[in-house]
């Protein structure tokens, strides 16, 4: 009883972290040292970047980790000035009961280049009192001067076997049943993302019955934006305005991100070609456009405009 | 002197309209005067209807007032330094209240400093003085956390006959001759904004001439959006690059112009391949706007501008011979209409991000799973409790309220767990005291400091149900805690 399992079952110690063994071994060397280089954790969502950072902080700073630790989300609406102010105020004070202080900045790749340059200055200014742990999905979006100031750790997607083990552990602790097929289905959908796996597991478990392949499928299909198929159908029938309206509503009302939309569209069309409901030639043309769209969104274009343009390829 | 100041109402009676609201305000003032502290007043309503005027009138009822325009510079420190101290300490001399007026709480710019809102929240919490907050937009994100702590007074636009009447009085006092129809027109055009009406009157007034309706029309005929509408028509209706370039020379945010063009492409163009081609150009324009922004090389804008201008215009074979009404992008209306919903969503995401170490976007991507989990009554309670969700936030995930029975049951369980946890911690502490060097300083409950004092709220619930011994034990435990606290801190310095 403590709310979301993703939080309840977040490993607290370095040695408990699932996967990423090599990274953990290297990080453990910093424990007990007088200083630590700036670190950058890069990798896809749900592979343990934040968990590792938190566990590392706790082992390094020990009992007084709370007092000597600052966690900031770099990409959330706060401006860089707020981030800088908070870093400044935090770094001005000497570490208490710990060798140094640690600042954890999440999603640095969503910061603008300007903000990253500002951050770089902050990193230089407080090298004596504080170390930074930066986390991002794509290190390519981080400016070189920051990268060169960090030891970079690349987190890989977690292996299916390891996710399954963790899910089994949770099932045992929580005392409910899950059959092998069910767990494997979760692993399949999670694609190496532990957070997603645990969320699907808890959602499936919340229905109160044992977890089976069917119950997992049900959760996954319920959790999907429902309108994607409808949107694609409209576009295929030539109703671009109608399709565009669905797209806008989904993004505004559900808050679905551009990257998620791309994934959903990809899954939807690739299902159609496999089921023989779409010509392979047309499909490959679409994939070309989808891939372009995906790349542009990650590069920093406006996801909605790019997706609207993508929809025209269906008509 | 501005007439809006010169003729600013000095008493509540002179304020036009909003009679019910005035009554609430009178009661509020009366209660303070009787020494009954009240929630802060939050005056919300469109500009120019007398919110600040009302606040200033109320100020007369108190010995002193401090006015702060929150949108000037509203960093946490400024707010705290300016009024933070005076708000929690009362004057040395007698029981005189100071009124704190904070204008433009919802601010002009959206996101720059959250600290300000937080500081206002804290001041509300600690203030022993009457406060009036003023804001324009009821649905503003900034107000979300403030609203529950305030008495909200929603003020309506001023009706145009009332405005006309006020204009007439001012005109008489200023000895201006005006055609009643002109005043009527000003009143109507002001759209409920008394201040702008008076300003318009002052701008047009001339001692030697009679004010005629014609002058009013001349002053305000320019539609703010006419420029952008011209630009869009130029792009969609023309195929001549020179015309297109000229049309796009507008004093507007280019990405806004792009939104307008994109919106209207499928409304003007009907051939599929033309829509495709035109939209591909929009996508490229957008790409270069993005690149310009992230590289800070705004030279890229010229490419963007050509993609969305000449690119879109040349995507059609021939110009269409039809009349298309240029439309405002539906995305804006969609976002406007759903602001309440979006703010609610972002509020929840904010809570999740604080409690679960995740970003807003990841928090939002978890919503569909939460919707499924919330079908389970007990789990719904657990998660809401964990995230400290408010009732309306719970409603985002389930339409039915969590049954009372479940709530009581879960609250009991939680209290029980707290007691057990406490006992366990007490034992651990005892062990620690015995072996001065503990082998494992942090046990399972690593997430919380072992001597953290449980929050008051749960302590109260526990107290109601715990037998005497447990209470005693608790007291003892507290003592223990203090001891360890001190010892540890001795070590560390």
Image (cartoon, coloured by chain):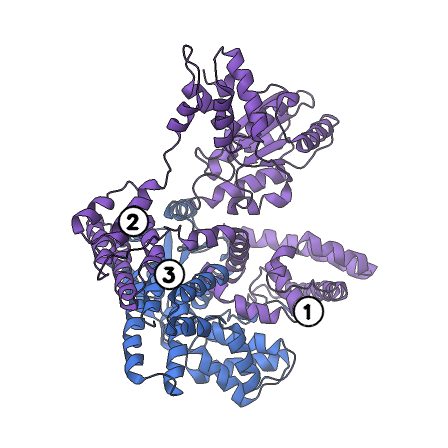
Chain colours: A blue, B purple
Is residue B80 depicted above or below A142 in this figure? above
- Give me the chain letter of mark 3: A
Is residue B178 depicted above or below B97 in this figure? above
Q: Nearer the viewer, residue A314 or B488?
A: A314
Q: Are marks 1 and 3 on the same chain?
A: no
Q: Quadrant of residue A20?
A: bottom left
Return the x and y of residue B211 as percentages of the image width and height: 44, 18
Please count the marks in the image: 3
Q: In the image, what residue occupies the spot 60% across and 21% down?
A: B64
Whether the residues at callouts 1 and 3 have beta carbons within 8 Å, the answer is no
Return the x and y of residue B122 as percentages of the image width and height: 58, 41
Q: Nearer the viewer, residue A22 or B9?
A: B9
Tell me if A167 is positioned left or right of A248 in this view. Answer: right
Which of marks 2 and 1 precedes in the sequence?
2
Q: Are there few (<14), some (14-19), or many (20+) residues within 10 Å of tag 1?
A: many
Whether the residues at callouts 1 and 2 have beta carbons within 8 Å, the answer is no
Q: Are there few (<14), some (14-19), or many (20+) residues within 10 Å of tag 3?
A: many
Disc marking residue B233: 2
On the rendered image, what quadrant is the N terminus of chain B found in?
top left
Q: In the image, what residue occupies the spot 47% across and 80% down?
A: A163
- Where does label 3 land, which residue? A304
Distance, label 1 to label 2, CA atoms, is 57 Å
Q: Are marks 1 and 2 on the same chain?
A: yes
Q: Are there few (<14), some (14-19), or many (20+) residues within 10 Å of tag 2?
A: many
Q: Nearer the viewer, mark 3 or mark 2?
A: 2
Tell me if B328 is positioned left or right of B136 in this view. Answer: left
Distance, label 1 to label 3, CA atoms, is 38 Å
Disc marking residue B12: none
Q: Are marks 3 and 2 on the same chain?
A: no
Could one spot residue B439 in this view of the protein? no
């Amino acid at each position: 009883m403590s709310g979301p399992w993703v939080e309840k079952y977040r490993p607290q110690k370095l040695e408990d972290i699932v996967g990423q063994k090599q990274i953990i071994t290297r990080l453990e060397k910093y424990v007990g040292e007088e200083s630590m280089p700036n670190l950058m954790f890069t990798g896809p969502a749900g592979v343990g970047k934040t968990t590792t950072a938190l566990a590392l902080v706790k082992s390094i700073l020990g009992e007084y980790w709370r007092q000597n630790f600052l966690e900031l989300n770099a990409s959330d609406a706060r401006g860089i000035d707020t981030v800088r102010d908070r870093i400044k105020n935090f770094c001005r004070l000497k570490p208490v009961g710990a060798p140094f202080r640690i600042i954890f900045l999440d999603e640095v790749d969503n910061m603008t280049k300007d903000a990253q340059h500002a951050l770089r200055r902050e990193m230089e200014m407080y090298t004596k009192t504080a170390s930074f742990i930066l986390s991002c999905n794509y290190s390519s979006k981080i400016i070189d001067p920051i990268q060169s100031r960090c030891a970079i750790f690349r987190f890989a997607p977690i292996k299916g076997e390891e996710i399954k083990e963790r899910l089994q552990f949770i099932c045992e602790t929580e005392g409910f049943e899950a059959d092998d097929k069910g767990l494997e289905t979760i692993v399949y959908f999670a694609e190496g993302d532990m957070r997603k796996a645990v969320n699907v597991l808890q959602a499936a478990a919340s229905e109160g019955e044992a977890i089976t392949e069917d119950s997992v499928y049900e959760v996954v299909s319920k959790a999907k934006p429902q309108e994607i198929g409808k949107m694609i159908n409209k576009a295929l029938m030539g109703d671009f305005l109608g399709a565009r309206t669905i797209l806008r509503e989904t993004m505004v009302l559900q808050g679905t991100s551009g990257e998620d939309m791309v994934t959903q569209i990809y899954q939807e069309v690739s299902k159609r070609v496999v089921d023989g409901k779409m010509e392979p030639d047309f499909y490959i043309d679409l994939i070309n456009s989808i891939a372009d769209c995906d790349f542009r969104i990650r590069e920093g274009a406006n996801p909605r405009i790019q997706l609207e343009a993508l929809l025209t390829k269906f008509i | 002197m501005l007439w809006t100041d010169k003729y600013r109402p000095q008493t509540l009676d002179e304020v036009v309209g909003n009679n019910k609201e005035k009554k609430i305000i009178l009661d509020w003032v009366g209660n303070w005067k009787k020494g009954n502290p009240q929630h802060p007043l939050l005056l919300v309503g469109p500009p120019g209807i007398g919110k600040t005027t009302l606040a200033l009138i109320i100020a007369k009822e108190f010995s002193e007032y401090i006015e702060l325009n929150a949108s000037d510079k509203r960093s946490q420190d400024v707010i705290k330094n300016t009024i933070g101290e005076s708000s929690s300490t009362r004057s040395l001399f007698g029981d005189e209240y100071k009124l704190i007026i904070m204008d433009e709480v919802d601010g002009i710019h959206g996101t720059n400093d959250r600290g300000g809102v937080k500081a206002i929240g804290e001041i509300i919490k600690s203030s022993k003085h009457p406060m009036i907050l003023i804001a324009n937009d009821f649905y503003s994100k900034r107000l979300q956390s403030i609203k529950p702590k305030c008495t909200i007074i929603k003020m309506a636009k001023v009706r145009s006959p009332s405005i006309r009447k006020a204009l007439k009085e001012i005109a008489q006092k200023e000895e201006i001759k005006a055609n009643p129809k002109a005043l009527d027109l000003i009143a109507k055009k002001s759209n409920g904004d008394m201040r702008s009406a008076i300003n318009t009157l002052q701008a047009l007034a001339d001692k030697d001439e009679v004010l005629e309706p014609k002058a009013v029309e001349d002053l305000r005929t320019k539609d703010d959006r006419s420029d952008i509408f011209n630009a869009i028509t130029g792009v969609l209706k023309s195929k001549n690059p020179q015309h297109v370039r000229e049309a796009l020379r507008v004093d507007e945010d280019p990405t806004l112009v792009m939104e307008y063009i994109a919106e209207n492409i499928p409304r003007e163009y009907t051939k599929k391949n033309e829509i495709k081609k035109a939209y591909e150009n929009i996508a490229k324009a957008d790409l270069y706007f993005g690149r310009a922004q992230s590289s800070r090389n705004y030279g890229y804008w010229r490419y963007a501008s050509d993609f969305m201008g000449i690119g879109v215009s040349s995507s059609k074979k021939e110009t269409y011979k039809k009349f298309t009404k240029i439309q405002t992008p539906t995305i804006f209306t969609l976002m406007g209409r759903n602001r309440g919903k979006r703010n609610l969503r972002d509020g929840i995401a904010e809570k999740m991000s604080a409690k679960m170490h995740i970003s807003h976007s990841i928090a939002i991507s978890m919503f569909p799973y939460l919707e499924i989990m919330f079908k389970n009554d007990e789990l719904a309670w657990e998660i809401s409790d964990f995230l400290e969700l408010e009732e309306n936030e719970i409603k985002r995930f389930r339409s039915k309220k969590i049954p009372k029975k479940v709530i009581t049951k879960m609250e009991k369980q939680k209290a029980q767990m707290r007691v057990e946890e406490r006992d366990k911690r007490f034992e651990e502490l005892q062990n620690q005291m015995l072996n001065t060097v503990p082998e494992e300083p942090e046990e399972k409950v690593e997430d919380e400091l072992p001597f953290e004092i449980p929050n008051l709220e749960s302590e109260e619930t526990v107290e109601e149900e715990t037998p005497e011994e447990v209470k005693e034990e608790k007291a003892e435990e507290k003592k223990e805690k203090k001891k360890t606290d001190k010892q540890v801190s001795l070590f560390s310095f």
